[in-house]
Image: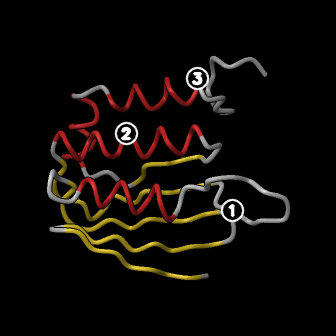
Amino acid sequence: METMTFSAPGLKLDLDERPEETIVHCRGKITGESAAAFENEIRGRVIPESRGKGISVTSRIVLDLSKVTYVDSVGLGAILRVWTAGQRRGCDVEIVNLSPRLEKLFSMTKLDEVFSKMKSLFGGADDPEQPE
């Protein structure tokens, strides 16, 4: 298990890498100042480019937003792009520990619905509308 830390203006990311899973602990604000670094670090360092023979890659990314105090529209876009990039590469991206404020923001912007609908489009097994 390896832990790496990356920083952007107002944001710190601690990557807790485990076999086939990486937990990204986010602290601070995901805003226009930090969104590009947030997206680039996760897409460039965590989401697998390919699944070659015998190569252990992350198949699950957990974005822990428990210590995120603020997300603006640019930050929401970065979270959505990270989530979509993971899904397209066969990597389950889970967003956890939203504060009540972020839960309300995700609900108001309908991102909570978008994530669940998109998961079914990308073959999410736990979608109740998916045939078994």
Q: Position of residue 70 (x, y in %)?
A: 16, 54
Which element is circle 1 on?
Answer: loop
Q: Position of residue 37 (x, y in %)?
A: 29, 61
Side (left or right) of 85 relative to 130:
left
Q: Position of residue 69 (x, y in %)?
A: 17, 59
What residue is pinned by disc 3?
121
Query: Residue at image x 39%, y 67%?
Result: 25
CA distance separating discs 1 and 2: 21 Å
Question: Mark 3 Cα within 10 Å, few/some/many (few <14, many 20+)?
Answer: few
- Among the 4 quarters of the image, the one containing residue 74: top left
- Among the 4 quarters of the image, the one containing residue 14: bottom left
Side (left or right) of 102 relative to 15:
left
Which is more toward the observer, 132 or 25?
Answer: 25
Side (left or right) of 78 relative to 115:
left
Q: Position of residue 114 (x, y in %)?
A: 40, 26
Residue type pointed to by label 2: Leu
Residue 33 in the image: above or below residue 7? above
Which is more toward the observer, 6 or 121?
Answer: 6
Which element is circle 3 on?
Answer: helix
What residue is pinned by disc 1?
57
What residue is pinned by disc 2?
80
CA distance separating discs 1 and 3: 23 Å
What is the quadrant of the C terminus in the image? Answer: top right
Query: Residue at image x 40%, y 25%?
Result: 113
Residue 4 in the image: above or below residue 50? below
Query: Residue at image x 68%, y 19%?
Result: 130
Query: Residue at image x 28%, y 39%?
Result: 77
Residue 77 in the image: above or below residue 57? above
CA distance separating discs 2 and 3: 15 Å
Q: Which tag is nearer the camera, tag 1 or tag 3?
A: 1
Question: Mark 2 Cα within 10 Å, few/some/many (few <14, many 20+)?
Answer: some
Which element is circle 2 on?
Answer: helix
